[in-house]
Amino acid sequence: MSGIITDLKNNETLIGVNIYFPDLKTGTTTNEYGFYSISVPQGNHTITISYIGYQNIEKNILVSQSTKMNWELTENGELLDEVIITDNQGKANTRTPEMSVNRLSISAIKKMPVVLGEVDVIKSILLLPGVTNAGEGASGFNVRGGGADQNLILLDEATIYNSSHVFGFFSVFNPDAIKDLKLYKGGIPARFGGRASSVLDIYQKEGNSNEFHMNGGIGLISSRILAEGPIVKDRGSFLIGGRASYAHLFLKLSEEQKDNSAYFYDLNTKLSYKINDNNNIYLSGYFGRDVFAINKSFSNTYGNTTLNLRWNHLFSDKLFSNLSLIYSDYYYGLDLDFVGFTWDSGIKNYNIKYDFKNYISDNFKLSYGANAIYYNFNPGTIKPSDADSGINPDQLDRKYAFEPSLYIEAENKLTNKISINYGLRYSMFYRLGNSTINLYENDNPVVFNTDFQIYEKATPTGSKYYGKNKTIKSFDNFEPRFAVSYQLNEDQAIKASYNRMVQYLQLVSNTSSPTPLDIWMPSDTYVKPQIADQVAVGYFRNIRNGDYSVEIESFYKKIQNRMDYIDGADLIANDAIEQVILNGRMRSYGLEFMLKKNEGRLNGWISYTLSKSEQQTPGRTPEEIGINYGNWYNSAYDKTHNVAITAAYQLNKKWDFGANFILQSGQPVTYPDGKYSYGDVFVPSYGLRNRNRLPVYHHLDISATLTPSKNKDRNWKGEWVFSIYNLYNRQNAASIAFRQNTDTAINEAVKTSIFGIVPAVTYNFKF
């Protein structure tokens, strides 16, 4: 028996719906496209279909032959107010080997208090165990001690290279357009590859194919609107959503700031069409831009563009396939009018992937597929901005690469208690030509000065040009994946997993948080791919029939070929980046704990992570000292303690309240441990790398949502969301700088804080 499960109201396919046969004690769930397949013996059976926030279906059916059964679920109006904040957060998964995975519903995210009143997908996952940020106002996120560049972020299967707006204040994801998101911290399926730490897999809604609807929100900083409706009723739909900020308009009211701007805008769109019961096509896209300008003399524009054409096809009731053609582009541009030139850089990739899932039996499912990505890297294009400019045009050497891969993965239920998931990914990477490569003595672009005990740039001995599509350097790696679950009883399970991930792209950045100016580059002759191995074990338990759940996991991760930089490394517009980098290694390990309350008016969770993240860059020869004398040192992402508490309380049908509390160890930094004097000038001398820490980071946020009772009887429905970020006005340190006081000539430390207390109000509507 197979079919598609959808929402009755809008025909939106539903991900992760439970299909269960109580008399057979067997079941399955729908995949990313709402499809399910299950084998049952002939005869009369009771089928139960359940999905949080929807009315259950329980029906007696006669199974006499293979058949296709599509199901439509009705949103549970009476229960929705009770469970909307716990959608997809319910019982701990004790039946399958899946572990180190978190799913958050958009309805839950929208209840969380956030900075400036803007609902934020990225900020919400910071409340999960093992996930931290790189500081207040910083972009990206860190998973289990890894860097933000080690996270693969996918929107409808397309890669997002920069997930933030306004330098990290907001994420690029419009919550109104998002359908489902899943964060893999470990036990990563074999279909994913290319990053060393995690995968954030996000899908957009498909649009309502029954009726036309609009919804949106008006806030103090930004507003959004989304429209969806049928192209052909019950067969085709469209979705288009836009979002923009307008805080920069208030700057125009100030004479000093009238020529300054800082704003963002983005657009989400999706078209879907059901050709017949076996074929569906989708076209989805995203376009976003940030603009930052000062006094008409400096402007900065950056953002992502993605496009995905997807075809779902059922070969049979047991074989499902998905073919995708994907384009992704990250652009960064500078217009420096006061200097007289413009700067463009970015990365583009073209991706084709074909995935299959074969439901061989209830106890054995097979997934396999192929993927091929072509990359075009532009480190920098410099052009004079006008005829009077004294700048000569220049093009930093473009880089090209090709990354094909194959994978196969099996889900196997060995007994009623033991289930395993195992797979293998074979990835290849080719650094391609139309590029000039520097040559160095002994192939060593970094030399060690034994007299001064420092690393220095090597002088090239020559160069070699590789023609278009000629292979400069190639790599290939097997990436095994394995997970096992042992179910102690219906409410308890222990699990273990191992996965290897290989990352062929490197982010050139010496900051703890990615900036828009950071450049992606491919592995090549001098830059090796990162190879990550991670093991994890966990205990999962449901208490009082799932009213509460406990998840405890321990992990250990090691990464080969993690880059670090020599002291004084200059990364901007560097056409020989290999001269300032050293290859080292990285390791992280820790314990994660999560207690969730899933039922009742008060819902939420408490998470705690105790972990360590370290790097080591030893000397390549006995004469070299490496970084920090070859000893292990704190990575920039090391947060020993990480506590997150989130709670939501429904007072009545009109009022909902929410609160978040986050506490993290201070971020590792390097402080000066002495100073030199030259005349009247004092110069700080910095100590060992990342030996110090910023002060402890913490804040409390609250929100209240008012839903007028008159919403019930009218088409226009609205709600008011009141929030306060950083309720007790904690001045968290984004950075601490050391300088010489111009009046006293004494060195002093200066703390920079971005946010104090921030109240906000937003009006959301739909009709």
Image (spheres, rainbow, N blue to C red):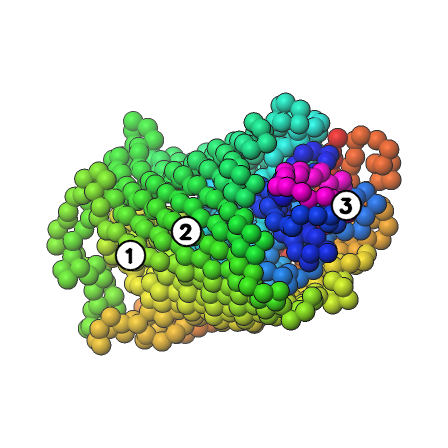
Range of magenta residues: 50-75
Q: Nearer the viewer, residue 748 or 345?
A: 345
Q: Nearer the viewer, mark 1 or mark 3?
A: 3
- Residue 324's place in the image compared with 473, above or below, is above
**Residue under label 1:** 527
Query: Which one is earlier in the sequence, the residue at label 2 or at label 1?
Result: 2
Residue depicted at 79% across the width and 35% down the height: 717
Residue depicted at 31% across the width and 47% down the height: 573
Q: Nearer the viewer, residue 232 or 340?
A: 232
| Amino acid type of the residue tagged 2 in the rendering | Tyr
User: What percent of the width, then of the height, locates residue 182?
Assistant: 57, 51
Q: How many numbered discs sit on the rendered protein? A: 3
User: What percent of the width, then of the height, locates residue 672?
Assistant: 41, 70
**Residue under label 3:** 59
- Residue 201's place in the image compared with 218, above or below, is below
Q: Quadrant of the C terminus?
A: top right
